Image (cartoon, coloured by chain):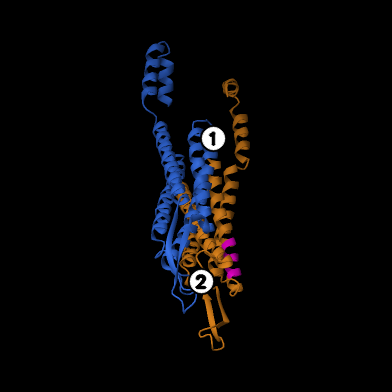
Chain colours: A blue, B orange
Amino acid sequence: MEDGHSKGSIINGMEGVESKESRDIMMVPKPASSTATCDLLLRVLALILTLVATIVLGVDKQTKLVSVQIVDTLPPLKVHATAQWHYLSAFVYFVVANAIACAYAAMSILLSKVKGLGTMISIVDALMVALLFSCNGATTAVGVIGYQGNSHLRWNKVCNVFGKFCNQVAVSIVLSLLGSIVFLLLLVLKLHRRT
Amino acid sequence: MEDGHSKGSIINGMEGVESKESRDIMMVPKPASSTATCDLLLRVLALILTLVATIVLGVDKQTKLVSVQIVDTLPPLKVHATAQWHYLSAFVYFVVANAIACAYAAMSILLSKVKGLGTMISIVDALMVALLFSCNGATTAVGVIGYQGNSHLRWNKVCNVFGKFCNQVAVSIVLSLLGSIVFLLLLVLKLHRRT
């Protein structure tokens, strides 16, 4: 810096040459632009993942003919039983949380172009990590009981009957988990960038 | 800035006065030290909250005399039923996650004094937010079914029998939630500080 400054004073008359050099320096792509592109791509990925996760669980429904034994002396009755996503509060929370994260991802793509909102966006990113990981935890916990049942609490497994329904829940959890990892990555990149 | 620079050039001979001024400025406490204290206090708080949450759920156990009807023609049998935290995988995950967060909080208090580890600590803080919120979600989802049951899946509520056990789970969830909010706050402060 000291050298550059003295040089600047010495070649005071050669303004044309100096400004050409400055232009050359300006032409070198800044690392900031590549991180901005990376940030944008991650936000688009988060948007897609949370959107698909919301839809996959939001349309999850399976109807099956199951036999129910009401009276021992009579043959079992065949009834139509339906499994729907809104029967469990954890699944409702999952759909709402992913919808919020999806809407925010779309909004953050637009807002990331506005100067001075970087910190605010990162803070909301951190809130999205918390929201998405909590809904993933809730849905996975209920899903595990659905798959395995729990003999201690006498909660029977339901995935042996509603296999398609459970598989759709599993796909949705994986998508949402990937979405929340993307939000976590956005946060890590932000922290790393500011070192 | 321009004014300050010109003044600096004009009073070039008054070096003594200028350096006294600089010393005065140096004496003003830096905001960095107050944020470091705040950071330390939050880490101690996170340590205590996750430690107590781990212990409260880790020692949770309730034995009750419940009546079980095995054969209709005979009177119901009285048996001792026990509810323990490790009967549910979500509760095991909760205890392990809180123990990890507690150990990390202790470690980060020591490591925060080491220069150059700030970003690494913040990244692990973000991972702790994800870990703790997912375990809170899992435990709350199972807790809600324990309190209310689910008629669609024929999962009976258990908290009407094991009331003390369930209350202890609720206390543990609140403590862990506060702990995870403290980790989130550490992250938000870090992002805000670097604006």
Locate the N terminus of chain A by quadrant.
top left
User: Mark 1, residues whose alpha carbon is within 10 Å: few (<14), some, or many (≥20)?
Assistant: few
Q: Where is residue A184 in the image (x, y as percent from the top left)?
A: 45, 47
Instruction: Tell me which segment is drawn in magenta.
Output: B166-174
Name the residue nearer the viewer: A4 or A83.
A83
Q: Is mark 1 on a helix, strand or loop?
A: loop
| Residue B51 in which image quadrant | bottom right
Name the residue nearer the viewer: A168 or B120.
A168
Spot the residue most to the top.
A13
Q: Where is residue B195 in the image (x, y as percent from the top left)?
A: 54, 37
Q: Which of the chains bears the disc numbered 1?
A: A
Across the whole image, how many numbered discs are drawn on residues? 2
Kind of residue at disc 1: Leu
| Residue B161 in which image quadrant | bottom right
Is residue B92 one of those drawn in magenta? no
Does residue B115 appear in the picture of this structure?
Answer: no
Locate the C terminus of chain A by quadrant.
top left
Q: Position of residue A82 (x, y in %)?
A: 47, 59
Q: Distance between the residues labelled 1 and 2?
A: 44 Å
B78 lies above or below A162: below
Q: Which of marks 1 and 2 is in front?
A: 2
Residue designated by label 2: B85
Spot the residue most to the front.
A74
Kind of residue at disc 2: Trp
Residue designated by label 1: A117
Which residue is at a point 41% across and 36% down the rendered structure image? A35
Looking at the image, residue B6 sits to the left or right of residue A60; the answer is right
Kindly check if marks 1 and 2 are in contact, taking CB atoms under 8 A apart as contact: no
Q: Which of the chains bears the disc numbered 2?
A: B
Q: In the rendering, which numbered label is found on residue A148?
A: none
User: Mark 2, residues whose alpha carbon is within 10 Å: few (<14), some, or many (≥20)?
Assistant: many
Name the residue nearer the viewer: B111 or A169.
A169
